[in-house]
Image (cartoon, grey):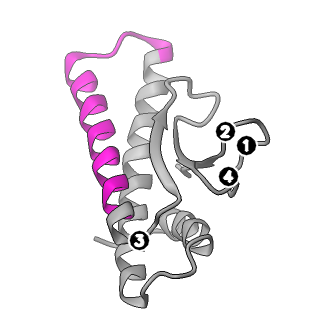
Amino acid sequence: MNTTKKGLALASRLIRYNATLPPANIASIQDTCSRICRHAATLERLAVAACNRPLSLAEEETDKAAEARVRELVTCLQAAGIENVVKVDFNGDPRGVVTKLKVTDRSGDWAGGDDYVCVPT
């Protein structure tokens, strides 16, 4: 798969706080982050549609599948050495961030209690 600009931005944000990564894993992490951004864009599109009308059965299945794929990809990130990402949270409100990664090291975008890294869409 091709690495996207949004995927590179997300990867650089995560790699910055995981300095002990082997160089061989960086390309894999960039590709995985690009795939996460791709599925996050699908989730955002479906969240906007759900605000305007009921989702069709096919759209609901696509939504569930995209969430499952993002969870799998987060597991791949962890296996590649990104240790500060502990889980993924989904928010169905398109006015905010639909997909965000919970981090443990205060490297997130939130000023509140929990730290999350926003997944660009």
Compare marks 3 and 4 and give the one earlier in the sequence: 3
Could you tell me residue 17's position as x and y percent? 62, 70
Please say if the residues under marks 1 and 4 sit with CB atoms less than 8 Å apart: yes
Q: Left or right: where does residue 121 sit relative to residue 107?
A: left
Please say if the residues under marks 2 and 4 sit with CB atoms less than 8 Å apart: yes
Residue labelled with disc 1 = 110
Picture layout, residue 59 above or below residue 114: above
Q: Is residue 23 magenta?
A: no
Residue nearest the viewer, comparing 77 with 58: 77
Picture layout, residue 90 above or below residue 24: above
- How much space separates mark 3 and mark 4, taking CA atoms? 18 Å
Task: For residue 35, say whether it is visible.
Answer: yes
Of discs 3 and 4, which sits in the foreground?
A: 3
- SS assignment at label 4: loop
Please say if the residues under marks 3 and 4 sit with CB atoms less than 8 Å apart: no
Instruction: Look at label 3 and name its amino acid.
Output: Gly
Residue nearest the viewer, comparing 64 with 105: 105
Residue labelled with disc 2 = 114
Residue labelled with disc 4 = 108
- How much space separates mark 3 and mark 2, taking CA atoms? 22 Å
Q: Is residue 70 magenta?
A: yes
- SS assignment at label 2: loop
Could you tell me residue 94's position as x and y percent? 56, 28
- Splitting the image into 4 quarters, where does residue 59 fall? top left
- SS assignment at label 3: loop
